[in-house]
Amino acid sequence: CQISGAGGDLILSADRDDEKSDSLIKFEVDGSEAMRIDASGNVGIGETSPLGKLHIKGTDTGATASAQGNSLVIEDTENGLSILSSSSGAGYINFGDSDDNNVGMVIYDHSSNSMRFWINASEAARLDASGNLLVGKSATTFSTEGIVAFSSADSNGSRINITNDGGEALN
C-alpha cells in the first residue's frame, strides 16, 4: 500500500509491484466498507463484488447485470435514476457511436412538458403535455387529426396497418 503525490496529484496504490493477484482498494466509514475499487478497475459503492464498471447497491436483489448493460449497475429493491434540469431546460439520454455522438436521444423538455424520441439524428416521435402521441411530426391541430397524429415523407402517406397473428389485415 502506498500513498504518494507528485505535481499536485494524489496517488493511492495497492500492490504496486503486482505481488498478489486480485488486490483492491477499500474505503471504510465507521468500521464498515462503503466503497471499493477492485483489480479490474470496477467500483462498488455498497457492493463488494461489482457487477460492472460502476455498481451502486442499496439492497441485494439477487439479480445479475446483462452483458449489454454492465457499465452502470444500480441495484436496490426499488431504485431509479434522476436527471434534474431547470424548469426551462431539458434532460437528455443520448445514444451515440463513433460517427455521431447523439444519433439517438430521449429528451424530456421541461419548457413544453413533452417527451421526445430521436432516431437517426432527428425527432421521430413526441408525447406532448396533453398525452397526445405525435409520430413523424412535432406539432398538430387535434381538431382534425385526433389523439394520435402521423406524418410521412413518402408518397404513400401515413397509415397504420393492423394485422392478426396470421398476418391478415384487420383494417
Image: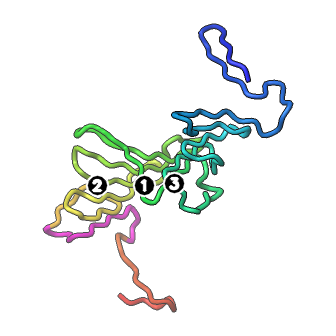
Density class for disc 2 (Cα within 10 Å; few <14, some 14-19, many ≥20) is: some
Residue at image x 71%, y 24%?
13
**Residue 24 position within the rendered picture, expressed as x and y whole percent measured from the top left:** 71, 35
| Three-letter amino acid code at the position of disc 3 | Glu
| Three-letter amino acid code at the position of disc 1 | Asn
Q: How many marks?
A: 3
On residue 79, which mark appears?
1
Residue at image x 84%, y 35%?
20
On residue 136, which mark appears?
none
Nearest the camera: 168 or 87? 87
- The local secondary structure at tag 3 comes to strand
**Residue 165 position within the rendered picture, expressed as x and y whole percent measured from the top left:** 49, 89
- The local secondary structure at tag 2 comes to loop
Identify residue for label 2. 138
In the orientation shown, which residue stands out farthest toward the top? 7
Identify residue for label 3. 75
Find the magenta span and give its range: 143-156
| Three-letter amino acid code at the position of disc 2 | Ser
Q: Is residue 95 left or right of residue 26?
A: left
| Disc 3 + disc 1, Cβ < 8 Å | yes
